[in-house]
Amino acid sequence: NAGVMQNPRHLVRRRGQEARLRCSPMKGHSHVYWYRQLPEEGLKFMVYLQKENIIDESGMPKERFSAEFPKEGPSILRIQQVVRGDSAAYFCASSRQGTDTQYFGPGTRLTVL
Amino acid sequence: KQEVTQIPAALSVPEGENLVLNCSFTDSAIYNLQWFRQDPGKGLTSLLLIQSSQREQTSGRLNASLDKSSGRSTLYIAASQPGDSATYLCAVITNAGKSTFGDGTTLTVKP
Protein backbone atom coordinates (compact mmCIF):
# COMPACT_ATOMS: atom_id res chain seq x y z
CA ASN A 1 0.00 0.00 0.00
CA ALA A 2 1.76 3.11 -1.22
CA GLY A 3 1.84 6.07 1.13
CA VAL A 4 0.65 9.57 0.43
CA MET A 5 2.27 10.83 -2.73
CA GLN A 6 2.97 14.43 -3.59
CA ASN A 7 4.38 15.90 -6.73
CA PRO A 8 6.38 17.69 -7.66
CA ARG A 9 8.78 17.42 -4.72
CA HIS A 10 10.38 20.72 -5.65
CA LEU A 11 8.81 23.52 -7.63
CA VAL A 12 10.38 26.80 -8.71
CA ARG A 13 8.21 29.61 -9.97
CA ARG A 14 8.75 33.26 -10.80
CA ARG A 15 6.57 35.92 -9.24
CA GLY A 16 3.21 36.11 -10.97
CA GLN A 17 3.20 32.53 -12.24
CA GLU A 18 0.84 29.78 -11.12
CA ALA A 19 1.80 26.83 -8.93
CA ARG A 20 -0.13 23.55 -8.97
CA LEU A 21 0.63 21.02 -6.27
CA ARG A 22 -0.73 17.49 -6.42
CA CYS A 23 -1.53 15.01 -3.69
CA SER A 24 -2.59 11.39 -4.09
CA PRO A 25 -3.95 10.02 -0.80
CA MET A 26 -3.32 6.54 0.50
CA LYS A 27 -5.52 3.84 -0.96
CA GLY A 28 -8.86 3.74 0.82
CA HIS A 29 -8.50 7.28 2.20
CA SER A 30 -11.13 9.80 1.18
CA HIS A 31 -10.07 12.68 3.46
CA VAL A 32 -7.27 15.03 2.44
CA TYR A 33 -5.67 17.89 4.33
CA TRP A 34 -3.26 20.57 3.13
CA TYR A 35 -0.76 22.29 5.42
CA ARG A 36 1.86 24.97 4.88
CA GLN A 37 5.17 25.18 6.71
CA LEU A 38 7.00 28.47 6.31
CA PRO A 39 10.77 28.51 6.90
CA GLU A 40 11.56 28.23 10.62
CA GLU A 41 7.84 28.10 11.47
CA GLY A 42 5.34 25.47 12.49
CA LEU A 43 2.82 23.60 10.42
CA LYS A 44 -0.35 25.57 9.64
CA PHE A 45 -3.63 24.03 8.55
CA MET A 46 -4.94 25.31 5.22
CA VAL A 47 -7.84 23.19 4.02
CA TYR A 48 -9.64 19.91 4.62
CA LEU A 49 -11.39 18.15 1.74
CA GLN A 50 -13.39 15.04 1.06
CA LYS A 51 -14.10 13.77 -2.40
CA GLU A 52 -15.71 16.65 -4.34
CA ASN A 53 -16.30 18.66 -1.14
CA ILE A 54 -14.43 21.30 0.82
CA ILE A 55 -15.10 20.60 4.49
CA ASP A 56 -13.05 23.36 6.12
CA GLU A 57 -11.02 26.05 4.36
CA SER A 58 -10.60 28.34 7.33
CA GLY A 59 -6.80 28.30 7.01
CA MET A 60 -6.71 29.15 3.35
CA PRO A 61 -5.76 32.69 2.29
CA LYS A 62 -8.82 34.37 0.80
CA GLU A 63 -7.15 35.29 -2.47
CA ARG A 64 -5.03 33.41 -5.00
CA PHE A 65 -5.32 30.03 -3.24
CA SER A 66 -7.78 27.28 -4.12
CA ALA A 67 -8.03 23.54 -3.55
CA GLU A 68 -10.02 20.70 -5.01
CA PHE A 69 -10.36 16.97 -4.59
CA PRO A 70 -12.24 15.63 -7.60
CA LYS A 71 -14.06 12.33 -7.79
CA GLU A 72 -11.23 10.93 -9.87
CA GLY A 73 -7.59 11.89 -9.60
CA PRO A 74 -5.42 13.65 -7.05
CA SER A 75 -6.18 16.61 -4.87
CA ILE A 76 -4.81 19.86 -6.28
CA LEU A 77 -3.67 22.94 -4.38
CA ARG A 78 -3.47 25.86 -6.76
CA ILE A 79 -1.71 29.13 -6.09
CA GLN A 80 -2.24 31.87 -8.62
CA GLN A 81 0.10 34.83 -9.15
CA VAL A 82 2.65 33.56 -6.67
CA VAL A 83 4.63 35.98 -4.52
CA ARG A 84 7.90 35.46 -2.64
CA GLY A 85 5.99 35.00 0.62
CA ASP A 86 4.39 31.85 -0.81
CA SER A 87 7.78 30.10 -0.65
CA ALA A 88 7.27 27.27 1.80
CA ALA A 89 6.89 23.53 2.17
CA TYR A 90 3.35 22.38 1.42
CA PHE A 91 2.33 19.09 2.98
CA CYS A 92 -0.63 16.93 2.23
CA ALA A 93 -2.06 14.33 4.60
CA SER A 94 -4.82 11.79 4.22
CA SER A 95 -6.98 9.72 6.53
CA ARG A 96 -9.66 7.08 6.23
CA GLN A 97 -12.10 9.04 8.39
CA GLY A 98 -11.94 12.68 9.42
CA THR A 99 -10.75 11.92 12.92
CA ASP A 100 -8.40 9.03 12.16
CA THR A 101 -4.63 9.05 12.09
CA GLN A 102 -3.33 11.37 9.41
CA TYR A 103 -0.58 10.11 7.17
CA PHE A 104 1.64 12.73 5.59
CA GLY A 105 3.25 12.96 2.20
CA PRO A 106 6.88 14.07 1.72
CA GLY A 107 5.84 17.61 0.85
CA THR A 108 6.34 19.98 -2.07
CA ARG A 109 8.92 22.66 -1.56
CA LEU A 110 7.89 25.77 -3.46
CA THR A 111 10.44 28.45 -4.18
CA VAL A 112 9.30 31.73 -5.70
CA LEU A 113 12.04 33.73 -7.36
CA LYS B 1 -9.68 29.51 18.73
CA GLN B 2 -7.54 26.50 19.57
CA GLU B 3 -3.92 27.19 20.43
CA VAL B 4 -1.30 24.51 20.91
CA THR B 5 1.96 25.21 22.73
CA GLN B 6 4.98 22.96 22.98
CA ILE B 7 7.63 23.42 25.61
CA PRO B 8 10.58 23.44 25.39
CA ALA B 9 11.20 24.67 21.86
CA ALA B 10 14.55 22.86 21.85
CA LEU B 11 16.13 20.20 24.01
CA SER B 12 19.57 18.65 24.03
CA VAL B 13 20.31 15.53 26.06
CA PRO B 14 23.07 12.91 26.25
CA GLU B 15 22.37 9.49 24.84
CA GLY B 16 20.58 7.14 27.21
CA GLU B 17 18.57 9.75 29.08
CA ASN B 18 14.84 9.53 29.54
CA LEU B 19 13.02 12.70 28.54
CA VAL B 20 9.59 14.30 28.44
CA LEU B 21 8.17 16.63 25.81
CA ASN B 22 5.18 18.76 26.69
CA CYS B 23 2.15 19.86 24.72
CA SER B 24 -0.66 22.04 25.98
CA PHE B 25 -3.88 23.13 24.28
CA THR B 26 -6.43 25.79 25.16
CA ASP B 27 -9.69 24.15 24.07
CA SER B 28 -10.37 20.78 25.67
CA ALA B 29 -13.10 19.93 23.13
CA ILE B 30 -10.82 17.68 21.13
CA TYR B 31 -11.51 14.34 19.50
CA ASN B 32 -7.97 13.02 19.60
CA LEU B 33 -4.34 14.09 19.85
CA GLN B 34 -1.52 12.91 17.64
CA TRP B 35 2.26 13.05 18.07
CA PHE B 36 4.49 13.27 15.00
CA ARG B 37 8.17 13.28 14.24
CA GLN B 38 9.71 15.42 11.50
CA ASP B 39 13.25 14.99 10.29
CA PRO B 40 14.97 17.99 8.62
CA GLY B 41 13.65 18.58 5.12
CA LYS B 42 11.25 15.68 5.36
CA GLY B 43 7.56 15.04 5.94
CA LEU B 44 5.87 14.03 9.17
CA THR B 45 5.80 10.52 10.56
CA SER B 46 2.95 9.60 12.87
CA LEU B 47 4.15 8.25 16.23
CA LEU B 48 1.11 7.88 18.43
CA LEU B 49 -2.57 8.80 18.38
CA ILE B 50 -4.55 9.10 21.60
CA GLN B 51 -8.32 9.19 21.51
CA SER B 52 -9.91 11.74 23.84
CA SER B 53 -11.35 8.90 25.93
CA GLN B 54 -7.89 7.39 26.47
CA ARG B 55 -5.23 8.32 29.01
CA GLU B 56 -2.14 7.01 27.27
CA GLN B 57 -0.68 5.10 24.36
CA THR B 58 2.60 3.24 24.13
CA SER B 59 4.78 2.22 21.23
CA GLY B 60 8.20 0.79 21.95
CA ARG B 61 10.24 3.36 23.85
CA LEU B 62 7.54 6.00 23.42
CA ASN B 63 4.67 6.69 25.78
CA ALA B 64 2.16 9.47 25.28
CA SER B 65 -0.30 10.61 27.90
CA LEU B 66 -3.34 12.82 27.65
CA ASP B 67 -5.11 14.85 30.33
CA LYS B 68 -7.93 16.37 28.39
CA SER B 69 -9.43 18.31 31.31
CA SER B 70 -6.21 20.20 31.96
CA GLY B 71 -5.34 20.52 28.28
CA ARG B 72 -2.05 18.69 28.46
CA SER B 73 -0.22 15.86 26.77
CA THR B 74 3.27 14.53 27.29
CA LEU B 75 5.50 12.38 25.12
CA TYR B 76 7.94 10.29 27.13
CA ILE B 77 10.99 8.88 25.35
CA ALA B 78 12.91 6.22 27.23
CA ALA B 79 16.61 5.53 26.79
CA SER B 80 17.10 8.17 24.10
CA GLN B 81 19.31 7.44 21.10
CA PRO B 82 21.00 9.74 18.55
CA GLY B 83 18.52 8.47 15.97
CA ASP B 84 15.74 10.08 18.02
CA SER B 85 17.08 13.51 17.07
CA ALA B 86 14.26 15.27 15.20
CA THR B 87 11.47 17.78 15.71
CA TYR B 88 8.47 16.40 17.57
CA LEU B 89 5.08 17.91 16.85
CA CYS B 90 1.78 17.44 18.60
CA ALA B 91 -1.56 18.10 16.94
CA VAL B 92 -5.07 18.23 18.38
CA ILE B 93 -7.95 17.19 16.18
CA THR B 94 -11.60 18.20 16.60
CA ASN B 95 -14.52 15.93 15.84
CA ALA B 96 -14.91 17.92 12.62
CA GLY B 97 -11.49 16.70 11.55
CA LYS B 98 -9.65 20.00 11.87
CA SER B 99 -6.07 19.82 13.15
CA THR B 100 -4.09 22.42 15.06
CA PHE B 101 -0.36 21.85 15.38
CA GLY B 102 2.13 23.09 17.93
CA ASP B 103 5.39 24.61 16.72
CA GLY B 104 7.32 21.55 17.84
CA THR B 105 10.22 20.65 20.10
CA THR B 106 13.56 20.10 18.39
CA LEU B 107 15.38 17.28 20.13
CA THR B 108 19.10 16.62 19.86
CA VAL B 109 20.48 13.45 21.41
CA LYS B 110 24.26 13.58 21.71
CA PRO B 111 26.27 10.36 21.44
Image: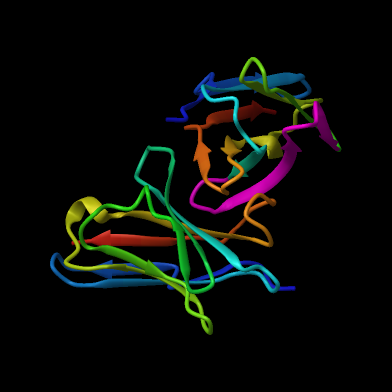
Residue at the spot 37% in from the left edge and 48% down from the top edge? A58
Q: Is residue B52 magenta?
A: yes
User: Is A25 placed above or below B65 here?
Assistant: below
Does residue A86 appear anywhere in the picture?
Answer: yes
Number of numbered discs on residues: 0
**A76 over B72 or under it: above or below:** below
Q: Position of residue A95 (x, y in %)?
A: 65, 59
Q: Residue lying furthest left in this view?
A: A16
Q: How is the image coloured?
A: rainbow
With B20 as the anchor, is A19 left or right in this view? Answer: left
The vertical placement of B30 against A9, above or below, is above
- Image quadrant holding the N terminus of chain B, namely top left
Please provide the residue range marked out in magenta: B39-59
- From the top left corner, tell me how far across and down residue B102 is, in percent: 50, 32
**Image quadrant containing the C terminus of chain B:** top right
- As for residue B48 lying within the magenta part, the answer is yes
Residue A37 is situated, as x and y percent measured from the top left of the image, at: 40, 47
Tell me if I can see residue B88 in this picture: no
The answer to whether A110 appears left or right of A63 in the picture is: right
Residue at 67% from the left image edge and 17% from the top image edge = B69
Depicted B106 relative to depicted A50: above or below: above
Query: x, y percentage for residue A105?
Result: 56, 61
Return the residue found at the far top. Answer: B70
Q: Is residue A38 left or right of residue B10?
A: left
Residue under the image location 47 percent in, 68 percent down: A53
Q: Residue furthest bottom?
A: A72
